[in-house]
Amino acid sequence: MRQVILGMVTCGLILGALGTLRAARAAESVSPRRLTIVPFTAVHVEDEFWAPRIRTNRERSIPHNLKWCEETGRISNFAKAAGLMEGKFEGIYFNDSDVYKVLEGASYALAQQPDPQLEKEVDRIIGLIAAAQRPDGYLNTYYTLTGLDKRWTNLPVMHELYCAGHLFEAAVAHYRATGKRTFLDVAIKLADHIDSIFGPGKKYGVPGHEEIELALVKLYEVTGEKRYLDLAKFFIDERGNTTHRQSYGPYCQDHLPVRQQSEIVGHAVRAMYLYSGVADVAAYTGDPELMAAMDRIWKDVTLRKMYITGGIGARHEGEAFGEAYELPNESAYCETCAAIGLVLWAYRLGLMHGDAQYADVLERTLYNGVLSGVALDGEHFFYVNPLASAGDHHRQPFFGCACCPTNVVRLIPSVPGYVYAVRPAQGDHPAELFVNLYIGGEAKIDLGLPQPVNIRQKTRYPWDGRVELTISPPSEAEWTLRLRIPSWCREATVAVNDEPAAPVVLSQLDRGYYLVRRKWKDGDKITLNLAMPVERIEAHPKVLADRGRVAVQRGPIVYCLEAVDNGFDVRSAVLARDPQFEIEFRPDLLGGIVVIKGTAADGRRLTFVPYHLWDHRDPGPMVVWVRQAGKPRHPDPNDPSWEGRLYRPLDPASLTGDETLTATEAARPSASHCWRNDSVEALNDGIEPKDSNDHSIPRFTWWDHRGTQEWVQYDWDKPVAVKGVRVYWFDDEPRGGHCRLPASWRILYRKGETWVPVNVPGSLPVVKNGWSEVQFEPVETTGLRLEVQLQPTWSGGILEWQVIEAR
């Protein structure tokens, strides 16, 4: 949304705006980015997948979020701050940002589809915002209503600069979409105020929640005012610099100067917004150290800390990244905002490098991690996106902290802007058009020719890998078409005007792109066929939560099992060595989807649905990573074949284990209570602890229950004969935690409809840093339960629970 978009809106701008436009073009001319943007206003989506979602966003999500912003006082806060009505501030101190994000989404929607009623409402709210602005340019309803003397005094916590950043983004989007300066003038006045407060020789500080950095660059792009770019660079340079202030620590990525950072840490959303801004500043300044830092951190994210869905941020505590390969499933946090942030960052790095790896991650995240955050009705949202569920996690209409619904509202209508990019002609090298996403529709693209080139995509992607591109240049001209061959694709063909083109050799692609260079004429047709077989994906052996498991993927879509389709707790499902996958397009299901059928190890046929569509029907368990028969539970974590990869297609020849499941493997675990960051699946995941304080592996705990009687349970579909158990208790005393060995425990088995104690004389052993093993008179049962009495004032947990079978 930079150079090209500005050219698209000139016809609707008043003379004052034209001056801003010329300045912005001057700003664009200094960008060293490899690629320039084809804006969302130049791309019209017409397909069966994205067009309905964009329409739903416009017709339902935007009104829905505006209604909630009105009902929760978010909008009336501006009227109060303007003195137009009486009352106190309502809600959380950063609630202004939610209004700005909805206005940004509404602006994108207005650019694509005129809507007088929506435009009138947008203008009304902008009027309230403008009225709430202080004479000196300051604008934040929380401080205006609670005490202006406290403004800019608590940067780590109070989100003033964060809110300002979202105002800038919304104002730029509104200006670009409508040509109106009403909101942009508010943004400029606020930016000038902030610039008068912060900078070298002024106030030194950085926002606790990053966002203003990337927003200032957007403001620079439409105004050409270099002070805004300089201020963005100042905030980036100051992060991690404690010369004039105390550090905010890793949570805010403030532990080191950005140029020295190599590992992704802290709050996932904050990190994504920061690094998006860093990428923007690096693109304009050409700073090699910032670029190198982005490359290092990108590798850390995508090779060690990213879920197969593109979700990021494993931990609930701090909404943060965990350690390398710490990617639990049922307790995964994966905030929707974090996935959106990864899309924003990947997009910018793709423009900087012209490398398809960034569009690969963008696509994976968009189709899985982002879309799971919003229901098909556009009015229910996930804040957290786990990769397994007991069936008690559901989308909500809104949240007290509503960053995710309002973020979805602005992301969905911006998707057309991610489809294409352009590398302008340089010397003897003609212009290049990059096709980064395959989405049906039409675009008018500026390639530096007298008139824009018209390009039409026709495709059923992501359900089908066939893409037809029809090219209509204003006159015959030579330039290069770059087709991204997705990293998930292992076989592709290209035809030009129905004649086979040069073979697609994956090892010979140019940064992931297949090139078609020719003198184009009106009506030229490119046909791309991307093979879309169903594949089982395995995770790096160091991802302990996924050992012995596979995920099912087809094209860019990650699939999951839901109980509603399969009639049992799918977390216990086990895929056969040869699942005999079949695909079926179901036009009647969830808006029309491809479902996958596969065979379980016990012979049952399983039905997989796209992960992003789970929780749309009857509630029940869900799982992405399914246990795989024959897959070793203890692979070599240092296997060199994994170099440079976090996920890869499963080689069926690697399935060397026994197809028959042990009773432990076949058990369905449950518990009286499980802490939200832990998982009952840890009970029988097959990962043996090194000691009772082992924090490197998934665990089960009863935290935050203390001193209570609790239980864990295994269930089987068919009776199993058991004669003992081995339990490895969790005890985090060495780390100062609150879990200890239990006071006592006993073993019960299901007999008919009742639970009966097994025959064990005396009390059961409680061992620290080892197995507590108990053998008893064999029983045949469909259920086994451990009843545990926790120590007074202490909680407890289990790292592993094995069943000893009577064979």
Image (spheres, rainbow, N blue to C red):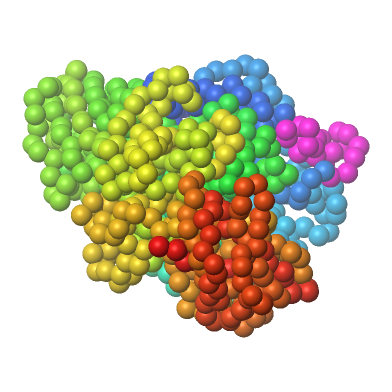
* Quadrant position of residue 377: top right
Report the number of numbered marks. Answer: 0
Residue plotted at (55% across, 18% down): 114
In the rendered image, residue 398 lying in the magenta stretch gets the answer no
58 lies left or right of 351: right
Res 51 quadrant in image: top left
Q: Does the magenta stretch include residue 87?
A: yes
Q: Nearer the viewer, residue 301 or 94?
A: 301
Residue at point 31%, 53% (across, down): 659
**Image coordinates for residue 729, horizontal then vertical, percent:** 58, 73
Q: Is residue 87 left or right of residue 474?
A: right
**Segment tinted magenta in the rendering:** 68-89
Residue at 48% in and 74% down:
689
The C terminus sits in image quarter: bottom left
- Of 674 and 266, nearer the camera is 674
Is residue 719 shown above or below 294?
above
- Image-quadrant location for residue 15: top right
Q: Where is residue 603 in the image (x, y as percent from the top left)?
A: 35, 40
Compared across the picture, whether 122 is left or right of 295 comes to right
Image coordinates of residue 461 in percent, x first then y, are 33, 29
Q: Is residue 377 visible?
A: yes
Whether 117 is drawn above or below 432: the answer is above
User: Is residue 259 at all visible to an observer of this figure?
Assistant: no
Q: Nearer the viewer, residue 565 or 612?
A: 565
Q: Position of residue 384 (x, y in %)?
A: 59, 48
- Give the side of residue 439 with respect to residue 492, left or right: right
Q: Residue at x 77, y 57 (%)?
A: 151
307 over 707 or under it: above or below: above
In the figure, 46 relative to 187: above or below?
Answer: above
Quadrant containing the N terminus in the rendered view: top left
